[in-house]
Image (spheres, helix red, strand yellow):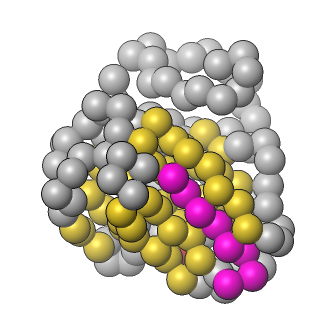
Amino acid sequence: SEDRKEVRHANKRQEVPENPKRFDRVANVMSKEAFSHGKHLWEVEVGDKTDWDLGVAKQSVNRKGKFTISPANGFWMLSLKNGTQYIANTFPPTFFSLSHKPKRVSVYLDFEEGRVSFYCLDTGTHIYTFKDTFTDKLHPIFSPGRP
């Protein structure tokens, strides 16, 4: 969106110039803002979507070609696939179920503690936490999945 606060999936591929900061095979969008220290919290409205990905990624992640979304590759992300399959994108992936399908998810980053935590804002419950050591700037990252 023009205010850079909303991401939507389009059924038509956009014709855009080549850019080394643009993902070429996946519909991921990284925020312009990056974090290199401190505690940060943001909310994501996923609504009734059946597919989405969200979390944080290192500024230096590979954005071209095929790659695995995992902490080893600089991604700390949760996904929903096919409306029911929740995945923490570890390697190998961690599959889990939730008793309530979140419509709003908060992402909490504690850079110094090396934690990225996800919470269901609808119920106030914890969903998942990644624990790691962060050395590079981290950007919020989103993929709206299929429409």
Q: Position of residue 24 (x, y in %)?
A: 57, 39
Q: Is residue 2 in view from this perspective?
A: yes
Q: Quadrant of the C terminus?
A: top left
- At a point 68% along the width and 73% down the height, the residue shown is 110
Q: Residue at point 76% right, 35% down?
A: 19
Figure check: 132 above or below 78: below
Residue at position x 39%, y 16% in the image: 11
Residue 128 forms part of the magenta stretch: no
Quadrant that contains the N terminus: top right
Tell me: 73 left or right of 123. Answer: right
State the residue at coordinates (56%, 70%): 116
Q: How many marks?
A: 0
Q: Which residues are magenta?
A: 106-113
Q: Nearer the viewer, residue 14 or 65?
A: 14
Query: Residue 47, how many percent across, how many down?
Result: 36, 32
82 to the left or right of 32 = left
Measuring from the top left, give residue 15's x and y in whole percent: 61, 16
Secondary structure mostly taken by the magenta-highlighted segment of the chain? strand
Residue 140 percent coordinates (x, y) = 64, 52
137, above or below 142, in the image = below
Does the magenta portion include 110?
yes
**For residue 59, above or below residue 105:** below
The answer to whether residue 69 shows anywhere in this view is no
Observer-nearest of 129 and 145? 129
Along the viewing direction, whichever of 44 and 85 lies nearer the viewer: 44
Residue 83: image quadrant is: top left
Horizontal side of residue 56 vs 31, given as left or right: left
